[in-house]
Amino acid sequence: MIQTFERDQDLVRHLKEYHNDADTRLFSVLDFASAFGSPLYALVYSKLFWPDFIELKGMIFHESIMESEEDRFRVEKALLAGQTRREIERSFNSFEIPSSFFSSNRGSTTLAEDVLLANRLGHMWRLRLLEVFPERTFTVDVECPVDEQPTIIVSQCNL
């Protein structure tokens, strides 16, 4: 396992390449946030790192996939088709990183950076689920098929 410092060095190296028109010689990760980030986008990203989850028929779903009546109908349809509630949760709560959340800038990261992001998101989502549903037990799996985007899959253990 790569140590955090080594991952940060790789990230800083990539950020320096990305911002090659600026003097970033002594920058750390947080220096890049300070120089190029914005509080407005920090608020946007906070929903990615600390999302809301919605309960429907005893199942828990990431809020981004239960935004309409059509989404709820798809859950009903899956139940009527005989899928288990765990299968439905895993199917609906499956997010490829980065394409599930970053449609326009997917190519701006390396596969290693995508895996790092998926692992960090997975860790934060576990903590968020524990906070919102302390009486339930969840798995937040981060699957990393070789040469493919990592995927985060969320489901309850006792369904």
Image (spheres, grey):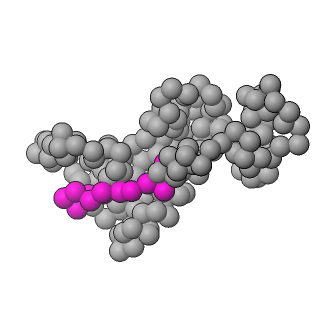
The residue range painted magenta reads 48-60
Q: What x and y, as percent, mark residue 87?
A: 28, 48
Residue 127 colored in magenta in the image: no
Would you place residue 35 above or below residue 56 in this image? above
Q: Nearer the viewer, residue 113 or 17?
A: 17
- Give the residue displayed 80% in from the left and 25% down from the top: 21
- Give the residue displayed 89% in from the left and 37% down from the top: 25
Quadrant in the rendering for residue 113: top right
In the drawing, does residue 152 fall left or right of residue 86?
Answer: right
Q: Residue furthest bottom?
A: 135
In the drawing, does residue 114 fall left or right of residue 94?
Answer: right
In the drawing, does residue 70 fall left or right of residue 50?
Answer: left
Looking at the image, can residue 56 be seen? yes
Would you place residue 105 above or below residue 67 in this image? above
Q: Nearer the viewer, residue 3 or 107?
A: 107
Q: What x and y, as percent, mark residue 69?
A: 17, 43
Q: What x and y, as percent, mark residue 56?
A: 22, 57
Q: Residue furthest left?
A: 80
Tally the numbered discs: 0
Looking at the image, can residue 49 be seen? no
- Give the residue displayed 47% in from the left and 45% down from the top: 152
Q: What x and y, as percent, mark residue 89?
A: 30, 50
Residue 55 colored in magenta in the image: yes
- Give the residue displayed 86% in from the left and 33% down from the top: 23
Quadrant in the rendering for residue 80: top left
Q: Quadrant location of the C terminus?
A: bottom left
